[in-house]
Amino acid sequence: MRVLVAGATGAMGRQLVPRLVGAGHEVHGMTRSASKEAFLRGLGAVPVVADALDPEQVARAVATSRPEVVVHQLTSIGPMDLRHFDRAFAQTNRLRTEGTDHLLSAARAAGVKRFVAQSFFAGYDRVGGAVKSEDDPFGTAPPPGMEQTVGAIRHVEDAVQAATWTEGLVLRYGGFYGPHTFLGPDGEQTEAVRRRRFPVIGDGAGVWSFVHIADAAKATVAAVERGAPGIYNVVDDEPATVATWLPVLAEALGARPPLRVPRLVGRLLAGETGAVMMNELRGASNAKARRELGWAPTHATWRDGFRELAAQLRAESGAAA
């Protein structure tokens, strides 16, 4: 199939484009910067230069590439700041609202058969059980400071599901780790854990779901090729509390155990958003994606992935010595 990947040079795009090419698809990679055309050719894609926030440029990009499938992976995330979460995601929120609308409009005009879009697991309502399925309430009560971000995620999901003229699939990814992510060899969260600047706030009872960026890309290829329209959690097999996964990560990285601070102090360090994410977040089940997309993560648990991350860091450190 002919596939247009919007956001083709981001962390996901770097993983996704080569896998789509390897699966025999003709891939067109949309990027805002002409300087990245050579990079996209190196990945095996036909570069398409367009600003996702310019509806005319998006319309031309889609009309020119004539895709059967559009994959929406548009993000532009600044340095992570839990105290000002919506500010850090401001540009991404525009891409998830305006950018989504532009892509859907252009895709409809071009007769696109399938539209696959990125979402995020952390919008589940923080009530009831610790692990949520796609049928559970989502995005109706966002954490303080995440109202705009969760609202933008809901916009993506609602707009794609309302597009009855195409087959719309939404992938609620877990927290990414791996190359070119915040929790990768050069990631700022990795460095914060190594420097003991990522504390457990309160009792750390918030449940997080992770997924290795390569596994997320594999699931996205599956969504391009098969699966009924709808929403899918793309996460690994082990949702875990912060109090469980953060010390394991620190140990794998050879760091001292994370500090533990009362929730009141944590609010001063990470804002109310950080405190809520540490203590109230709900994880997600991947049962539907396994069943209906025929997908299973290679990194079945973040435990394996964190050990792999630590090994990469040791190898890089040894090579630099």
Image (cartoon, helix red, strand yellow):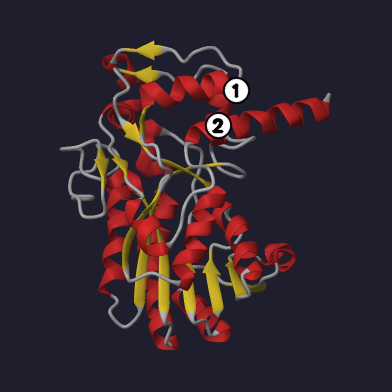
Give, as a three-letter code, the residue at label 1: Leu
Pointers 2 and 1 in contact (C-beta within 8 Å): yes
Residue 175 lies in what quarter of the image?
Answer: top left
Q: Label 2, secondary structure: give it.
A: helix
Which numbered tag is attached to residue 253? Answer: 1
In the image, residue 224 above or below residue 166: above
The amino acid sitting under disc 2 is Phe
Answer yes or no: is residue 73 visible. Answer: no
Mark 2 / mark 1, whichever is N-terminal: 1
Evaluate whether residue 125 shows in this view.
Answer: yes
Residue at the location (28% across, 69% down)? 161
Q: Position of residue 233 (x, y in %)?
A: 35, 53
Give the answer, above or below, for where 90 lies relative to 312.
below
Judge from the rendering whether residue 188 lies leftward or rightward of residue 261; answer left or right. right
Q: Residue furthest left?
A: 128
Where is the N terminus found, in terms of image quarters? Answer: bottom right
Give the number of callouts.
2
Q: Residues within 10 Å of mark 1 (few under 14, many from 20)?
A: many
Image position of 218 with respect to 274: above or below: below
Real-space CA distance between mark 2 and mark 1, rounded to the nearest whole angstrom: 8 Å
Which residue is more in the foreground, 12 or 289? Answer: 289
Q: Residues within 10 Å of mark 2 (few under 14, many from 20)?
A: many
Closer to us: 216 or 35:
216
Q: Quadrant of the C terminus?
A: top right
Q: Which residue is mark 2?
A: 306
Answer with left or right where residue 217 lies relative to residue 179. left
Badge 1 element = loop
